[in-house]
Image (tube, rainbow, N blue to C red):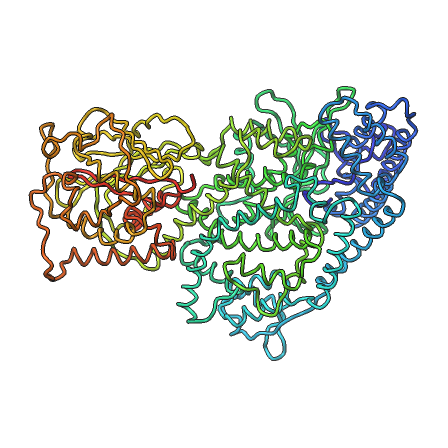
Amino acid sequence: MTENEGNDKKIEGSNPKKKLNVVTFTGAAGLPGCDTVCVNLSAKEILDLADEIIHKSTRVHDAVALVSLDKLSYENVVLPLAELEARQLSLIQCCVFPKMLSPHDNVRKASAEAEQKIDAHILSCRKREDVYRIIKIYAAKGESIAPEAKCYLQCLVRDFEDNGLNLTAIKREEVERLTNEIDELSLRYIRNLNEDSSCLFFTEDELAGLPLEFLQSLEKTQNKEFKLTLGSRNVAAILELCKIAKTRKTVAMAYGKRCGDTNIPVLQRLVHSRHRLARVLGYSHFADYALDRRMSKTSMRVIRFLEDISSSLTDLAIREFSILKDLKRKEEGEIPFGVEDLLYYIKRVEELQFDLDFGDIRQYFPVSLVLSGIFKICQDLFGIKIEEVTEVDVWYHDVRAFAVFDSGSGKLLGYFYLDMFTREGKCNHSCVMALQNNALFSNGACQIPVALLIAQFAKDGSGESVPLGFSEVVNLFHEFGHVVQHICNRASFARFSGLRVDPDFREIPSQLLENWQDITKPLVDEVCKTLKRWRYSFSALKSLQEILYCLFDQIIYSDDDADLLQLIRSLHPKVMIGLPVVEGTNPASCFPRAVIGSEATCYSRLWSEVYAADIFASKFGDGHPNLYAGLQFRDKVLAPGGGKEPMELLTNFLGREPSTEAFIDSRTNFNKVRIYEIIIFFLKPKMSMSLNALTRLPLKNTGRFEEVGLVRQSLFSSRTACRETAVQQRRMVFVVEAKGKKGMAARQYQRTPPPMPKIEDDGNPRFVIFIRMANVYLWYPLSIIAGGTTAKIMVAAKDNLLGKYIYKDTIARNIAAVIYRVNYTSCFLFGLIPLFNMMRKRFKRQQLSSTVSCENGNMRAALSTSDVIELPTQDQLKTVFDKVKDYFGDAKESFGKLTSLNPGTDQKTEETPDEKANRILVSFTKMIYNRFTGPEAEQLSLGWLILMSQPSRYGLQKILSDGMKHVALSLSSTCLVWLAYDTHG
């Protein structure tokens, strides 16, 4: 109950009578309208209030148990318990939270004692057979009540049945015995880890790379060696910063061997006992029992979710891993890469790639500025107004209180306290607690929510707050998301209010709010972008590490026969792209999350992050607070709380079922570009190329991609990769227009995109082409509809020059080659790159005019606005390369009148500078291609190569980020036509 999980157990209570002195404040005034929120009680008042809570709760339960069976009703069975819970929850919290925050030792001890007494009482209430019998009989009547009330009734029944009251006496004894055994084994596992005293000794040279402050914190032996205990802080520092590979491996091995002999048998017994408990309660295994009341529902769904995320990130993780291996090989030689090297080389690459001094960045994050930024964002996003409340009772002088109002109506929504800074006697973690939940009573009264945010920020010697680090800023945004979630909830029952929602759903609002953490600071643009890139660097590898342990947790609790000794060793290389577990270790012996607190639910944080990414991408894609979407989120997602199924809330808000695509895209799209930048950073190649080309986003039925503008820019460049924002990148596509003058001069600007052709949604795959003639400004859209083994081209263009100069055979064959994915076509395309450059230099472009016609006046040989052309079958295809070798063969018309064409001879000539540049370009293109796609050479296409070869990051990003993998080319005397389609579709 001390975490932001809320307090799911402590629900019983009633409204204290005014004669109780324990409910009065001993200091200043309380929060207006919250007379039951008592934040500064003395030790005696806490113990007295705990006794009063127990007394009132017992009295209400006794009254429910005595209701006559022929007079059972909602008003005398469910309503008394619901209002008891709502009114006493705040009193319970006032007894309990001082143990975490009070500056007085006697108050903390009294609070801990009160918590034990209240916990024991709650457990005894949930084992009362007389109350359970009344509730069960009433539930069986099937009386018509409100949906939220019905949900509450179901929860009441489960509270009792979780303690075995629906079982026989023998089975009930078995449940109690297994529960006690599980508690004892869990505590033993944790105690073994806490009591582990393993340590290692290293010389100063063996700790090279560690900062002086860290070394000074270590104990030093008489022989001048440093004693390193295996606490998580020390181990993380070694694995991230130590330059000596042997030291990293030694520490990783020792850390992974902790408690191997003691904790593996304990974990085996613990897992077995949990499976037995689940079977007694009517479930096939413990995972299904733990997930029955969560969004995920079943273990199979969780495993499928984790495997889908893992498989989607594997390709990117391989490319990330390749960068790390290359750097290790460069710095340490041919030494195998181990798990112990991951953190170190991720940090090394980040140091090389990102010019960030986190000490200097702190100056941009004073606490007051971060808070004002958070308040501003939440006000703009959710339509609320935050005002500080002064002269109220607090438990420490630097604690602050705030009121939250609806910005439209001015209605008071709730309050929150901020306890931001570390001090003696305070807990050492950050969280949000619900001091009072929203609730509606039968007399029409409304109880407003009150939240408490606990942080652990530092102060300097003079008592002034120290500016925050970037990770602290992100964490504060996350925690404040829980505050907003609690304050904006409007559930009628306290059981479903604020943080008392499905744990799989609880973290979604906080994960969503983290997306705006970079708007609070007056940083220069480059630092903002760099911070965001740093935060998501190597996200695929990091996510796979998390998925590994989530899968382990899920499998051991869904398979009673799982071998704990071998499971993690077999999972590790499968998930971590071939990396084996550290030699001689078994992480199962030191994995406390799977033992207590997150057993069978380790996946929950990733689950929330995935669906938060979907919400952000769908409703807040431009990165700026959107009041309309924010109000919808507040009304449709936050306000109902736990009274409705979370999946139903998200589906209602999104207009569809939640998807994992946005999360995958946010990782793969962002990091593919970053990997490309890292390669360029190390290799720094110089390239030059210029073509007439146009790439265009594919038409998507999903609506995920917006219509984009056009940008004219030359591919002839050796400048530094441009760094547009994500929003700018979405609005741009590459257009390269060949000028009729030396140097291929070009300029960059946005243009209004051409209208898309109207296409009926018949379920067929869609492809969109845009063609631009060299001397005609307009862009002409074509729609390609594929079906079966053939495809038809329908031209949606004006009746103009388009039909005269695009040779239908060439375009048909090229498009067909892409649709059929003809391998040999792709294989020969390498050879075309220098040829195109040669043609550009040697062919004199002819100006188009209305008098020029196709050869022999054969207008049927060209496309027209009414043409419908059937593409050739796969067997009928002849490669473009063959056509070029045959002096363009049947495609002669597609190149117009070639006045200076000289096919040349087979005689070898001295390599010119241009030819050398082309050869280097092809070699570099092959290298880049192999880095991105490995052995999948059959997916190669000319357009893919050309866009990857030019040094502009943007052109590469459009191909990678939007999933375009196949590009076909059609030639004419005046234009090149690109066709791209989305492999995700």
Which quadrant would residue 401 be assigned to in this image? Answer: top right
Q: Quadrant of the C terminus?
A: top left
Side of 498 where 657 appears, left or right: left
Camera-side residue: 964 or 750? 964
Camera-side residue: 324 or 852? 852
Residue 689 in picture, x, y percent from top left: 22, 49
Residue 698 in picture, x, y percent from top left: 36, 36
Query: Is residue 238 shown to the viewer in this render?
Result: yes
Residue 229 in picture, x, y percent from top left: 64, 67
Residue located 69% across and 51% down the image: 599
Side of 845 where 578 appears, left or right: right
Residue 261 in picture, x, y percent from top left: 71, 68
Query: Is residue 720 shown to the viewer in this render?
Result: no
Which quadrant would residue 512 be assigned to in this image? Answer: top right
Q: Residue furthest toward the left?
A: 899
Which quadrant would residue 794 be assigned to in this image? Answer: top left
Q: Residue furthest toward the bottom?
A: 223
Q: Quadrant of the N terminus?
A: top right
Camera-side residue: 98 or 729? 729
> Is 100 placed above or below 908 here?
above
> Is 220 placed above or below 710 here?
below
Camera-side residue: 245 or 189? 189
> Is 606 placed above or below 806 here?
below
Tally the marks. 0
Residue located 33% across and 40% down the image: 980
> Is 624 placed above or below 916 here?
above
